[in-house]
Image (cartoon, rainbow, N blue to C red):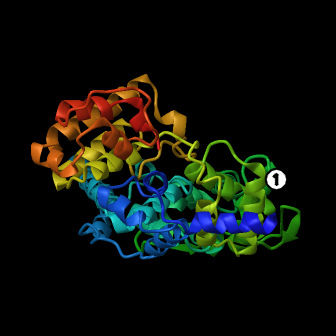
Amino acid sequence: MKLLFLLISFISFSFALSVEESKHLLNRTSFSYTQADLKLFQSFSKKEAISFLIHSAKDTKTLAVPEDLREISLPLKNRKSLSREQKKVLRKARVKKMKELQMWWYQMMLEPQHAFREKMTLFWHNHFVSSYKVVKNPYFMYKQNQLFRENALGSFDTFLHKSSKDLAMLIYLDNNSNKKSHPNENYARELLELFTLGEGNYSEMDIKEAARAFTGLRVNRKKQITLRVKKFHDFGAKTFLNQSGNFDAKDIIDIILKQEQVGIFIVSKLYKEFISEEINDSFVKTLAKDFKESSYDISFLMQSLLISDDFWNMNNKSIKSPEELMIGLIKNLDITVSTKELRFLIKFGKNLGQELFNPPNVKGWEGNKAWIDSSSFVLRQNFIKKVLNRKLKPKKLKELGINNYEVFQAYFYPIESKEEYVFKNNKKHFSLLLTKSIYQLR
């Protein structure tokens, strides 16, 4: 019987993906799909499709970075002597550069070969949270974004150590003011609560001792590097998670990574993002153990998640994030986006509650059901209508080749709609059908 089960499982993962399976996979991993994407993925088995996604995501080459990003972010020698108007001009220049950086990221989200990489980058942006509104430095936000991209599918061990020295992170969580005489616990608290262990798996004393270990770790804004200032560092003995020693920042992270709870916390968070809000505890615990034993290999973890029966349960549906909705609609309609229209995405992303580089707080975007209420649903509908009015020309309607309701819902909807509809291939009918609540699901 066991052999028969294994054989059936092997066969199911060897068959080419169906249209529904391709849609399910790409909706979860790639900000949705174009018709070409669906055709490509229907030539893959499940294993081949997942390998393709993970292999593609390891290419970390990006589009050209906005010019003068580093220079405009440098501190001015004579800042104190600047007039109020001059300071205002500088702030505006940095905000303008930040918008260019947002457009740069949108462009990469729209590239099919980088979709999964950018989805993972966005996930980590919502895990190791920082925001431009606090950091106020475009270059530091860019460097952090690159850190997420380059480590998105690498070692979580390495990733966590690097994030602890990240310029934007140290500013956002006030570690610049963390010194022996006046420890600041913000970074230590979030490291334990939001980045690794989760609430209830450490004590207040653990936070205090970890904060001591991170004293003196600060940002040199002029050189744009992280360094440890010895005179501000607490070299005394510390007791952290029941271990004692003369610990520094690296030691604290090494001790954290020995805890079984780290794997459970990270796997649970990825499970919620890619599978369902309703956690399968036994599966998560097993995968967390394997994740830790793999030396925290994120590629291994994602491969295991995406190949699982839980992932391929088509009954698991969740609400699209604003970015998934916006990028997904553009992909589904297979339309090109100009620089001006990228600014349109920035505006609507903010209005819909997901402005890139500006999560609302240290906990990030809550996601799923929190994305939609009566007012945000109307805003989502307005976005869809505006895109259709601008982009859905007769030629594009003909190119899409969607000439009846069955074909329409088989392509656009994540589940079959049970209502009957007399469909006409025109902008009005597309607008009516794409603004229905069913299109908000993934």
> Residue at point 36% right, 39% down?
409
Depth order, front residue of 321/310: 310
396 left or right of 245?
left
Q: Residue at x 47, y 36 (%)?
A: 371
The kind of secondary structure element at disc 1 is helix
In the displayed structure, does residue 247 sit left or right of residue 124?
Answer: right
The quadrant of the image that shows the N terminus is bottom right
Q: Is residue 330 left or right of residue 367?
A: left
Q: Position of residue 401 (x, y in %)?
A: 21, 48
**The quarter of the displayed image where residue 257 is located:** bottom right
| Left or right, 323 with reference to 395 | right
Nearer to me, 251 or 267: 267
Residue at 58% from the left image edge and 45% from the top image edge: 363
> Which percent across, then down, holds residue 243?
87, 67
Query: On screen, 34 above or below 114?
Result: above
Name the spot of residue 267 as percent of width and height, x first.
67, 58
Q: In this rendering, is residue 66 above or below 94?
A: below
Q: Work out whether residue 189 or residue 349 is closer to the camera in this orientation and state it.
A: 349
Instruction: Mark 1: give few (<14), some (14-19) or many (20+) Cα within 10 Å.
Output: few
Observer able to see residue 341? yes
Residue at the image point whose x is 64% and y is 69% from the top:
10
Task: Tally the marks.
Answer: 1
Of residues 200 and 340, the one nearer the viewer is 340
Residue 214 shows up from this direction: no
Read off the residue under disc 1. Answer: 205
What is the residue that sits farthest to the top in this orientation?
374
Q: What amino acid does circle 1 point to?
A: Met
- x, y percent for residue 5: 74, 63
